[in-house]
């Protein structure tokens, strides 16, 4: 493919057109494309656009009279229709040659794409695409839908979506305060050139579910920077909330952020003997009083419940209720929360309803078992649509499941069949519909949870899926963003539609780097969690108290249960900072 | 550009064809989800139905009708056109990078599976990176935040469970996020959403915690090795 000419830069598509198209535009301006508007026909609502002067026209080549030909082009200058074949005679090319200049650009009648007869290549133009999208839109509106593209946005999403990531430096008053309450860190043994903050965590009795997640969180760059720059000072927090009677653990109110703060101080103190996160366990248990006994604890559940704990405490202190998705909330949500978009389109009328939901992680199914058993395949295809078969072909061509495959499956169009009909506001009845998820806003840190534990309530049993899942060290999330998904829905036309969507993709870089993997080995109930951490581009295995160095291969081959990715920019910032303690 | 297309025309067997059709639909469905090529499909399935079975595939002469080839050609151009657009606009995913990652992972699995490459001696550690070694049960001693007794780190959680009155049978798994959210996403992929007023911290936090139950069994917690 010689084609990566128009690389999107930061999500923006840069177009380079051929000299003939440039010439055509210079002469005709963008008006020429707007004139086409009346000839654009979109057959099923939201469907493909074609060019016909009147709906029942049967176009044929002006030179040879062929009408069954699959490639008929209308000259953009004189509207003459000609056929074209990549090899052999091309009446379209002949038409362009027949006149001195200016008849090179034509339009594909069946596909509404521009074609340069001189270059013999499909060419692309923003204004032309905009005209096509407009036609597709109005077609679906005629079909009954009212709002189609510009979808309702959550109120405060528009304004302040950005999570400010500004470094904090203490002002004079704060510096005095800091000086009075802290002692400078002793220099870590310089002979050990190991990353700062690497420290084992004692197993407190089957608490590897907690240790594994804590290790990942302790090395989550934005979280680490937050706590290490003293943004949640435990002494200050306890003081404030106890009206001065701080210090006493027992009476101090439970604040998981305070416990995180204490843990960060301990782990980054330079002490390398294993640390016992006992106080944290105690506080978390108080928070999660209704959770199952720790013996059945699951690392992912712990993750969710402890972030929830941090959120809740900080919110109670907080002034106004925040919207979690927009980055204004507590530190847990500022780091982990993203926004998902879900579109449901009525298959009868084309009306689309869009909803947004905040999320702190994405739980992914291990894809259904690959090809081997035809029974499984049959069951899957029975279940529903074309889409179901998709994942099997796309990502499992190699016979292994991949994280990218899971994400593809996650954002694939799903048909909500007769058993799960969706109420259409337009038709005012339940209709079959298409549903598609996409990511409206990426978090700073993306946590993917692989559903390895299956709980079947009907059969009252649980089982663990031990299958390997390949995950990349670098992950580009752009194909799963709402902007990409929306664009592909409109045939990948370049259109300036929902600027907000475009905004979201440029504002938040979509490139991520893996920095922690929580793995689970062994059986459902007698398993063990271990975390692999990537610090200064070296991998470390944190197995409770034991921290060892491991080869990247070990990590790549590991059975991931939770994968933590951070935005590439922050990853590199974090790696630079390492070592320079 | 139309790689798949040319390859396909060369081998005009019925089987290859039907597989190709499946693929085609999948692709179009994925890339252009809201667009259906059902128009073509219905025409084609009629033709295909007229082919009795695979054995008869040899007699594909009837398939090579003009009609058939026209539709086929048209579909190939459709797909080619779609992919041309994706490629030219730089919207194709960085497949080379994905391939590279896949390759690295596959190689890693092969190497890791080879037992001679293992660093650990029988899965046991000798020393950690700091040159330390650790007992199987962590032996740091500290006092329980709940009852004040001295307790060994490695036995803290089971002690605390009793000390705080967290019975084994006591709690239903109320907040199993996996099950709670299951119905929201029919595909089964679910997302842990949360609400600001999450109910997961219950009000009965320490209701039966500190006082009563604690005494029952922790006498052996204090000085156990
Ligand atoms: Zn012709
Ligand atoms: Zn002309
Ligand atoms: Zn040209
Ligand atoms: Zn606090
Ligand atoms: Zn929050
Ligand atoms: Zn409807
Ligand atoms: Zn106790």
Image (cartoon, coloured by chain):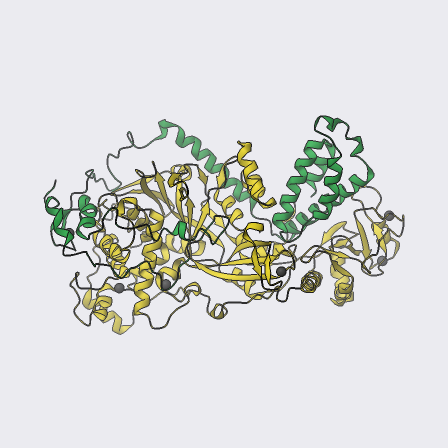
Chain B takes which shade in the image?
green
* Residue B68 or residue A348, whichever sits in front: A348
* Residue A454 or residue A236, whichever sits in front: A454
Q: Position of residue A62 (x, y in %)?
A: 89, 52
Q: Quadrant of residue A330?
A: bottom left
* Residue A128 or residue A436, whichever sits in front: A436
**Residue occupying image coordinates x 18% and y 71%:** A244
Q: Position of residue A259 (x, y in %)?
A: 25, 58
* Residue A131 or residue A342, whichever sits in front: A342
The C terminus of chain A lies in quadrant: bottom left
Whether A543 is drawn above or below B122: the answer is: below
Observer able to see residue A556: yes
Q: Quadrant of ligand 5?
A: bottom left
Instruction: Specify the chain shown as yellow.
Output: A
Q: Is residue B1 left or right of residue A288?
A: right
The N terminus of chain A lies in quadrant: top right
**Residue occupying image coordinates x 83% and y 41%:** A88
Q: Position of residue A213 (x, y in %)?
A: 32, 49
């Amino acid at each position: 493919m010689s084609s990566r000419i128009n690389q999107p830069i930061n999500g923006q598509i840069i177009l380079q057109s051929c000299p003939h198209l440039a010439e055509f535009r210079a002469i005709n301006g963008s008006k020429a494309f707007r004139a086409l508007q009346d000839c654009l026909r979109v057959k099923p609502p939201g469907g493909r656009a074609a060019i016909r002067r009147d709906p029942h026209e049967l176009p044929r080549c002006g030179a040879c009279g062929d009408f069954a030909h699959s490639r008929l082009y209308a000259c953009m200058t004189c509207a003459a229709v000609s056929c074209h074949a990549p090899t052999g005679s091309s009446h379209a090319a002949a038409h362009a040659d027949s006149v001195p200049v200016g008849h090179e650009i034509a339009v594909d009648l069946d596909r509404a794409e521009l074609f340069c007869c001189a270059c013999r290549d499909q060419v692309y133009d923003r204004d032309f695409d905009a005209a096509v999208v407009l036609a597709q839109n109005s077609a679906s509106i005629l079909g009954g839908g009212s709002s189609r593209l510009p979808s309702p946005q959550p109120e405060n999403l528009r304004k302040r979506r950005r999570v400010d990531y500004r470094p904090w430096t203490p002002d004079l008053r704060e510096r005095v305060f800091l000086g009075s309450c802290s002692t400078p860190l002793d220099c870590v043994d310089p002979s050990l050139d190991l990353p700062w903050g690497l420290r084992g965590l004692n197993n407190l009795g089957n608490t590897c579910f907690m240790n594994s997640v804590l290790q990942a969180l302790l090395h989550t760059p934005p979280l680490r920077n937050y706590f290490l720059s003293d943004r949640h000072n435990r002494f200050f927090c306890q003081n404030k909330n106890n009206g001065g009677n701080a210090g006493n653990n027992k009476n101090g109110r439970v604040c998981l952020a305070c416990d995180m703060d204490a843990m960060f101080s301990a782990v980054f103190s330079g002490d390398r003997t294993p640390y016992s996160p006992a106080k944290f366990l105690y506080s978390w248990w108080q928070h999660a009083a209704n959770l199952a006994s720790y013996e059945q604890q699951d690392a992912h559940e712990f993750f969710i419940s402890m972030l929830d704990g941090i959120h809740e405490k900080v919110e109670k202190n907080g002034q106004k209720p925040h919207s979690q998705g927009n980055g204004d909330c507590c530190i847990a949500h500022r780091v982990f929360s993203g926004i998902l978009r879900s579109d449901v389109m009525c298959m009868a009328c084309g009306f689309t309803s869009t909803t947004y939901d905040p999320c702190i992680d994405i739980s992914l199914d291990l894809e259904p078992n690959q090809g081997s058993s035809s029974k499984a395949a049959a069951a899957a295809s029975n279940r529903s649509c074309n889409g179901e078969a998709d994942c099997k072909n796309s990502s499992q061509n190699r016979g292994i499941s991949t994280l990218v495959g899971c994400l593809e499956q996650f954002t694939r169009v799903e048909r909500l069949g007769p058993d799960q009909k969706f109420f259409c506001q337009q038709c005012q009845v339940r209709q079959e519909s298409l549903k598609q998820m996409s990511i409206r806003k990426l978090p700073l840190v993306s946590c993917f949870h692989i559903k390895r534990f299956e709980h079947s309530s009907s059969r009252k049993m649980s089982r663990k899926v031990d299958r390997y899942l390949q995950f990349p060290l670098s992950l580009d999330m752009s194909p799963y963003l709402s902007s990409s998904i929306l664009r592909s829905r409109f045939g990948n036309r370049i259109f300036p539609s929902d600027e907000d969507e475009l905004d979201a993709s440029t504002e938040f870089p979509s490139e991520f780097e893996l920095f922690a993997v929580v793995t689970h080995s062994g059986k459902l109930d007698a398993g063990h969690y271990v975390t692999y951490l990537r610090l200064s581009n070296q991998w470390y295995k944190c197995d409770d108290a034991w921290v060892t160095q491991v080869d990247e291969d070990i990590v790549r081959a590991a059975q991931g249960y939770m994968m933590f990715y951070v935005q590439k920019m922050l990853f590199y910032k974090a790696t630079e900072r390492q070592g320079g303690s | 550009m139309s790689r798949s297309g040319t390859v396909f025309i060369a081998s005009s067997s019925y089987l290859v064809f039907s597989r190709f059709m499946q693929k085609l639909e999948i692709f179009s469905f994925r890339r252009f989800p809201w667009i259906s090529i059902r128009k073509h499909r219905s025409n084609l399935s009629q033709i295909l139905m007229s082919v009795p079975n695979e054995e008869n595939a040899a007699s594909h002469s009837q398939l090579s009708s003009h009609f058939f080839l026209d539709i086929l050609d048209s579909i190939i151009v459709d797909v080619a056109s779609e992919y041309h657009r994706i490629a030219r606009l730089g919207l194709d995913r960085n497949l080379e990078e994905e391939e590279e990652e896949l390759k690295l992972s596959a190689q890693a699995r092969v190497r890791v599976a080879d037992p001679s490459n293992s660093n650990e001696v029988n899965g046991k550690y000798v020393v950690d990176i700091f040159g330390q070694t650790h007992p199987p049960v962590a032996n740091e001693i500290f006092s329980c935040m709940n009852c004040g007794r001295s307790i060994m780190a490695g036995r803290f959680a089971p002690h605390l469970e009793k000390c705080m009155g967290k019975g084994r049978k006591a709690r239903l798994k109320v907040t199993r996020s996996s099950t709670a959210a299951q119905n929201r996403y029919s595909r089964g992929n679910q997302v842990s959403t949360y609400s600001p007023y999450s109910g997961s911290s219950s009000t009965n936090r320490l209701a039966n915690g500190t006082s009563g139950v604690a005494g029952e069994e922790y006498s052996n917690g204090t000085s156990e090795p």
